[in-house]
Image (cartoon, rainbow, N blue to C red):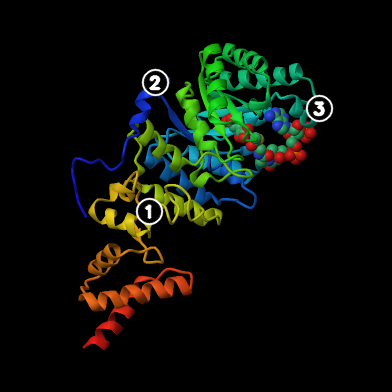
Amino acid sequence: MENDEQYPEYCRNKLMDFVKKRDIKIEICDVTLRDGEQTPGVAFSKEQKMSIARHLDEIGIEVIEAGFPVVSESEKDIVKSISQMDLDAKICCLCRSTKKDVEIALDCDVDIVSVFLAMSDLHLKYKYHKELDEMLTVAMDAIEYAKDHGLGVRFAAEDATRTPIDRLVGAFKQAEERKVDYVSIADTIGILNPSTAKYLTNEIYKAVDTKICIHCHDDLGMAVANTLAAAEAGAYQLHTTVNGIGERAGNAALEEVLVGLRVQYGIERYNLKSLVDLSKEVACYSKIEPAINKAVVGENAFSHESGIHVAAILENPRTYELFLPEMVGGQRNLIVGKHTGTKALAGIIKSMGYTLDEDDFNVLFDQVKVITENEQRSVNRDELEALIMNILEVSD
Ligand SMILES: CC(=O)SCCNC(=O)CCNC(=O)[C@H](O)C(C)(C)COP(=O)(O)OP(=O)(O)OC[C@H]1O[C@@H](n2cnc3c(N)ncnc32)[C@H](O)[C@@H]1OP(=O)(O)O
Ligand SMILES: O=C(O)CCC(=O)C(=O)O
């Protein structure tokens, strides 16, 4: 394989030079330990949460949402323990729009509280059974209380993407008067697409001077695209979870957002080398394996079987890889299957230390085709070696 220094680890999307967008000035707030843990059936232990937090910090994640302390005494203890880990990342926790939740957060020594409030008609009517003004008054009181106690504050508009924009702007302005540090656009039910993510973020960007957060759910499989589209319109804090875990279809996947930031916008400051390890860790603790074809961290993210692809990859992997597996701590797998070609098979057996004469090679190639087609599967390296040994024995 060619090791050509002129190619970097990844291919920059040069088409981005033609796209109209704001300067990408961003930070990441990873919410794996809070929204990620809201995945049905997931409950991380204290040790697991602390280990994930350390890993996120090593990657260079700027803000870690450590939990929702009002959930339980144990959750409160975990959030406090993470706050005391002395990480570079700022530690944030979730609070309803109540003083009580902020008081509990204060006990946890967090840097930032995320005070959330839904303002859509549906949520006001069926969840709170209250008028907007009443809810907003309580929310602003909670925000003032948090600010008075020296906390950083995010005012998060739950279900923002089904809330009238003027109502959203009005509430954000009230929060801004109270000097909140961030306002958050939460796409709670995942209705956005990249066009509307850009439109809504742009409207908020024009109306307020406070940093904007974007929090996307993946109900239509667009959470990562929506997050990046919002960043192009001026969103500053991008919310992610490892492996995209979270409520229902999950959240914007950290690994995809980080690689997206690098490939699309050239943001290189995050240490991506441990993304695959972190994914495995979270998969183990959450007991949820990412899909085999999941971008960046799925088992097939760097697997290749097709003869034409493998033949080219053997010359230079960049022919069929947007970024090299080493960039994210992954590994390339060349698979022997129905679609394997002669160059690929020759390259693979050579890498295993074998060379066969033409007749033996043709026998091996035919055997591989028969097995993979009749049994509808690939051939692993042990089996391939056994086939080779058998052929060599017969021809001796
Ligand atoms: C979009 C999001 O992800 S929001 C976060 C969602 N996460 C979770 O719910 C996970 C953890 N939740 C829990 O452990 C519990 O639901 C708790 C501890 C938060 C609350 O438990 P309970 O006191 O038993 O209340 P319950 O869950 O039945 O109902 C929620 C209450 O919170 C209120 N509430 C919900 N959101 C808010 C808000 N943003 N601000 C103020 N009150 C709120 C509801 O109106 C309801 O109040 P009510 O009890 O007066 O009717
Ligand atoms: O916007 C936020 O910071 C959190 C909101 C949230 O979790 C949601 O609405 O799904």
- Percent coordinates x, y for residue 317 in the rendering: 28, 51
Query: Left or right of 389: which side holds 218?
Result: right
Mark earlier in primary sequence (2, 1): 2
Question: Residue at left 43%, top 56%?
Answer: 300
Camera-side residue: 333 or 280? 333
Q: Is residue 127 above or below residue 131?
A: below
Three-letter amino acid code at the position of disc 3: His
Query: Left or right of 380: which side holds 5?
Result: left
- Percent coordinates x, y for residue 240 in the rendering: 50, 38
Question: Residue at left 76%, top 18%?
Answer: 134
Camera-side residue: 90 or 274? 274
Which residue lies under the disc numbered 1? Answer: 302
The reply to whether residue 149 is in sight is no
Three-letter amino acid code at the position of disc 2: Asp
Which residue lies under the disc numbered 2? Answer: 23
Q: Quadrant for residue 309, please give it.
A: bottom left
Label 3 CB, ligand 1: below 8 Å?
yes
Q: Label 1: how many residues lie within 10 Å, few (<14), some (14-19) or many (20+)?
A: many
Q: Is residue 136 above or below residue 194?
A: above
Three-letter amino acid code at the position of disc 1: Phe
Q: Real-space Cα distance between discs 2 and 3?
A: 41 Å
